[in-house]
Image (cartoon, helix red, strand yellow):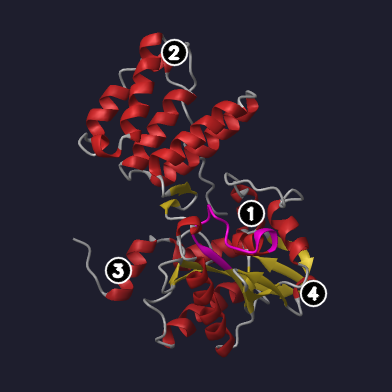
């Protein structure tokens, strides 16, 4: 069974912040918001100032500044994403929604136009030419169709199309689902490997497609600089399986024949009952925007454990960076 990684959690505050400690945090806020000045200070110098807050007084407020500092210096971004989620959850438990919103807004101002997402700190669609990305998807759909792979917009890209008619402004990558052979769990992994090989054999990609190291996804880079995640879809006994959100929750008839949804004014292939799929993926409140939505990965890993075990043995031992180095014959120095 795949290992479930517990996100890093903020320290538990044992004493209230003193006036002196609050002043330290406010000074850090001002420094990080000043782009010219902050570049003149090293991470270590700012962290020393932050660490002048006594350990017993370090809690959510202190951790929020750690997250902002990491982001500004481009450090430990996946940890930052996990910390942000945990800060939010703790604030909600303590009925401190306003405090979390203040932190989220302060972080947005500090790192704009970049945003902190589950993938790290990236340029969101709100600051991209969305029409260009949409055309890239049209070209990718055409390529997949020529290779004999039915596919459609999925997850966040489907959510944006149905709810807003565009990419989600805070999102940073595109998601497609691709139908592959999945009679057995072994077939799922073998077919996903073949999909990657078939794409690379065309010679039409900017660089070779690669495998995500932690889950059964083929990743493709398109001309606009956006990464596209190709999620496997397979059918068994008329039930649909789509890593990581659908485990026999939908039937073949919920998806096929495919319909279309407009994305940036362009018709894109979509599941027949798109709203039903979105409810499975995001819950019944999918119509309400939630930029900090966090997918229940632990539950998904348990449901898809058998496929994941096979996938990890074949593709999950190496990092994505190592996989790319292997593809291009680059030695790490």
Q: CA distance from mark 1 to mark 2?
A: 39 Å
Residue at point 54%, 39% (across, down): 85
**Could you tell which of marks 2 and 4 lies nearer the N-terminus?**
2
Task: Give the residues in magenta.
Answer: 162-175
Judged from the image, the secondary structure of the residue bearing numbered disc 1 is helix
Q: CA distance from mark 4 to mark 1?
A: 21 Å
Whole-angstrom CA distance, mark 2 to mark 4, is 58 Å
Q: Which residue is mark 4?
A: 238
Q: Which mark is residue 300?
A: 1
- Asked if residue 8 lies in the magenta stretch, the reply is no
Residue shown at the point (72%, 74%) measured from the top left: 235
Q: For the residues marked 2 and 3, what is the alpha-carbon distance in whole angstroms? A: 47 Å
The residue tagged with tag 4: helix, strand or loop?
A: loop
Q: Label 2's element?
A: loop
Q: Position of residue 272 (x, y in %)?
A: 76, 73
Residue bearing mark 3: 325
Quadrant of the rendered structure where residue 159 is? Answer: bottom right
Tell me the distance, in whole angstroms, between the alpha carbons under discs 1 and 3: 29 Å
Is 42 placed above or below 218 here? above
- For the point 59% across and 68% down, the residue is 264
Judge depth for marks 1 and 2 and give the one in front. 2
Mark 4 vs mark 1: which is more N-terminal?
4
**Looking at the rendered structure, which numbered label has been put on residue 196?**
none
């Amino acid at each position: 069974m795949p290992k479930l990684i517990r996100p890093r959690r903020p320290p538990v505050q044992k004493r209230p912040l003193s006036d002196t400690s609050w002043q330290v945090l406010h000074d850090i806020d001002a420094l990080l918001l000043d782009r010219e000045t902050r570049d003149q200070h090293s991470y270590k110098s700012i962290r020393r100032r932050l660490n002048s807050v006594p350990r017993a007084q370090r809690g959510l407020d202190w951790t929020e500044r750690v997250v902002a500092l990491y982001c500004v210096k481009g450090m430990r971004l996946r940890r930052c994403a996990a910390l942000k989620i945990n800060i939010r959850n703790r604030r909600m438990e303590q009925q401190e929604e306003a405090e979390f919103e203040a932190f989220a807004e302060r972080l947005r101002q500090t790192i704009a136009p970049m945003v902190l997402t589950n993938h790290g700190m990236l340029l969101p669609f709100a600051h991209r030419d969305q029409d260009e990305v949409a055309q890239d998807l049209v070209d990718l759909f055409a390529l997949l169709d020529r290779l004999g792979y039915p596919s459609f917009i999925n997850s966040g890209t489907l959510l944006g199309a149905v709810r807003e008619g565009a990419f989600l402004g805070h999102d940073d990558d595109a998601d497609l689902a691709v139908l592959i052979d999945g009679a057995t769990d072994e077939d799922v992994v073998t077919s996903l490997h073949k999909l990657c090989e078939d794409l690379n054999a065309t010679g039409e990609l900017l660089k070779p497609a690669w495998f995500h190291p932690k889950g059964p996804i083929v990743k493709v880079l398109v001309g606009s600089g956006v990464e596209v995640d190709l999620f496997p879809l397979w059918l068994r006994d008329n039930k649909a399986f789509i890593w990581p959100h659908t485990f026999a929750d939908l039937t073949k008839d919920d998806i096929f024949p495919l319909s279309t949804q407009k994305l940036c004014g362009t018709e894109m292939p979509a599941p027949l009952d798109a709203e039903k799929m979105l409810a499975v993926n995001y819950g019944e409140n999918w119509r309400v925007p939630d930029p900090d939505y966090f997918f229940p990965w632990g539950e998904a890993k348990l449901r898809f454990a058998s496929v994941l075990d096979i996938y990890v043995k074949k593709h999950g031992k190496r990092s994505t960076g190592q996989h790319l180095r292997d593809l291009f014959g680059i030695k790490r120095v």
